[in-house]
Image (cartoon, helix red, strand yellow):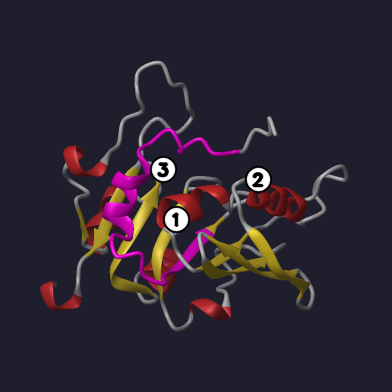
Amino acid sequence: TGKTLWSPLLHFDQSIILSKVNPRRDHLVLYYPGPGHDLTNPLLLTDASTFVFVDRTSWHYDPKDTIWEKITSDLIAIGGTIVKDEEVGENKKEMTFMFQERERHLIYYFHKNVYEFTAPELQDGFDIYFNIGSGPFTEQAYVDEVLGKLWRSGGTAIGQPNMLTPSQIHELQLKGASSREHLWEEPPRGVTSTYGSLMIATKANKLEN
């Protein structure tokens, strides 16, 4: 179609990233603060089943093409099929869609401050912390309450290199955070991207603390 997707990380080897983030293709819950209209990256790079997005912007930030329209058009462009699409209360939209023969669910909260609002869908815990868009979100209270308590042990962080401070990486006991060899993926020669490096780390299991 000639459509350009906002996917600055897709020059990375998807199979390598999946082998670190979701090797068994489990039905994981992914949390993405400040995602804008970026569903493509977390979907293709993690193969998660439930996506919980929280963003400060309104979905009508662009009168010509809303965030939701961008999300749906990008999803269709990569082979997704929308099953159900609805507005649920004020500043919340949900979508059920099929992708690679699996049903998936997107919950998106608009006009919400990440530091002040925690999506109810996260209260039972989430597996993947994804942050390559806005942020980083490093306010300590947020890190303690959301990442410290709701992010499941053994879960994965994937995002921009500065998504957490060195002290927060230590506090959360993220494995791989001190090893450049295991932490970073470098883009191939000749590829220019704002996200030339990618952080991937695993939260230590409680039994290993």
Residue 160 marker: 3
Q: Residues within 10 Å of mark 1 (few under 14, many from 20)?
A: many
What's the magenta region?
A: 6-32
Task: From the viewer's side, name the closer residue of 209 and 165.
Answer: 209
Specify whether residue 140 is in view.
no
Question: For numbered disc 1, what is the local secondary structure?
Answer: strand
Along the polypeptide, which appears first: circle 3 or circle 1? 1
Specify whether residue 71 is in view.
yes
Kind of residue at disc 3: Gln
Kind of residue at disc 1: Phe
Q: Residue reaching furthest front?
A: 101
Task: From the viewer's side, name the closer residue of 167 and 79.
Answer: 79
Residue 19 located within the stretch drawn in magenta: yes
The location of residue 136, given as percent across then percent down, is 47, 48
Q: Residue at x 60, y 38 (%)?
A: 6
The location of residue 95, given as percent across then percent down, is 67, 69
Task: From the viewer's side, name the closer residue of 173 and 154.
Answer: 154
**Vertical position of residue 178 compared to residue 144: above or below:** above
Name the residue tied to disc 2. 77
Residue 141 marker: none
Question: For numbered disc 3, what is the local secondary structure?
Answer: loop
Q: Residue reaching furthest bottom?
A: 124
Residue 130 marker: 1
Kind of residue at disc 2: Ala
The location of residue 16, given as percent across then percent down, is 29, 45
Q: Residue at x 36, y 70 (%)?
A: 26
